Amino acid sequence: MKASLPRRMTLPAIEAAVITLGYGPKRETFDLVAFKALHNGKRFHMRLETHGLDRVPKGSEIDLHMDFFREVKGFHGSEGESEEIAFEMAQLLGSLNAQDPDRTRPRVRCPECGKEFGQEAFRAHRKVVHGF
């Protein structure tokens, strides 16, 4: 499923948005990719065109799909359209809109309690306090 970035944002703001949804972001030369944990042989995979910039322009393409892995010789496929992917895309766009678009530090605000943490501390906080 494809969508576009709702507003101009910094890379740390985009990373914070995807981390709050449980993704692990990785920067590439011209893209930001993020994966959710593998569940039943499937995982969400998001790719955002950054054009190699620190401030990503409004309208940059977001590609969200589901990867699935077959055990036979490691073949890998994907699914681009489904109700589950549409729901995940809506959550992703909502999370992007909730972030401060000019964020310069890679800090994450917890959507449940509002506390702000570094990325690794946020993951630990979410597991310990909120059970996710």
Image (spheres, helix red, strand yellow):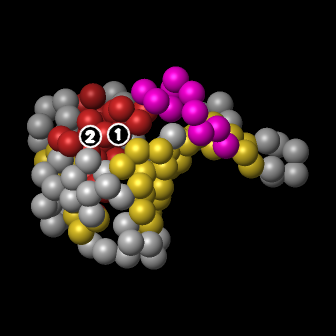
Residue 109: image quadrant is: top left
Whole-percent x, y for residue 3 in the image: 41, 44
Whole-percent x, y for residue 82 in the image: 57, 27
Q: CA distance from mark 2 to mark 1?
A: 5 Å
Q: Nearer the viewer, residue 83 or 18?
A: 83
Asked if the residue under mark 1 is in contact with the one under mark 2, i.e. CB atoms within 8 Å, the reply is: yes
Q: Residue at (50%, 32%) from the top-left corner? A: 85
Q: Residues within 10 Å of mark 1 (few under 14, many from 20)?
A: many
Q: Is residue 122 left or right of residue 66?
A: left
Q: Residue at (18%, 47%) from the top-left corner? A: 99
Mark 2: amino acid? Ser
Provide the residue designation for mark 2: 95
Q: Secondary structure at mark 2?
A: helix
Provide the residue designation for mark 1: 92
Q: Secondary structure at mark 1?
A: helix
Q: Residue at (42%, 63%) from the top-left corner? A: 49
Mark 1: amino acid? Leu
Residue 22 visible? The answer is yes
Residue 85 within the segment the image draws in magenta: yes
Whole-percent x, y for residue 32 in the image: 42, 62
- Looking at the image, the residue that sits furthest to the top is 83
The magenta region covers 78-87
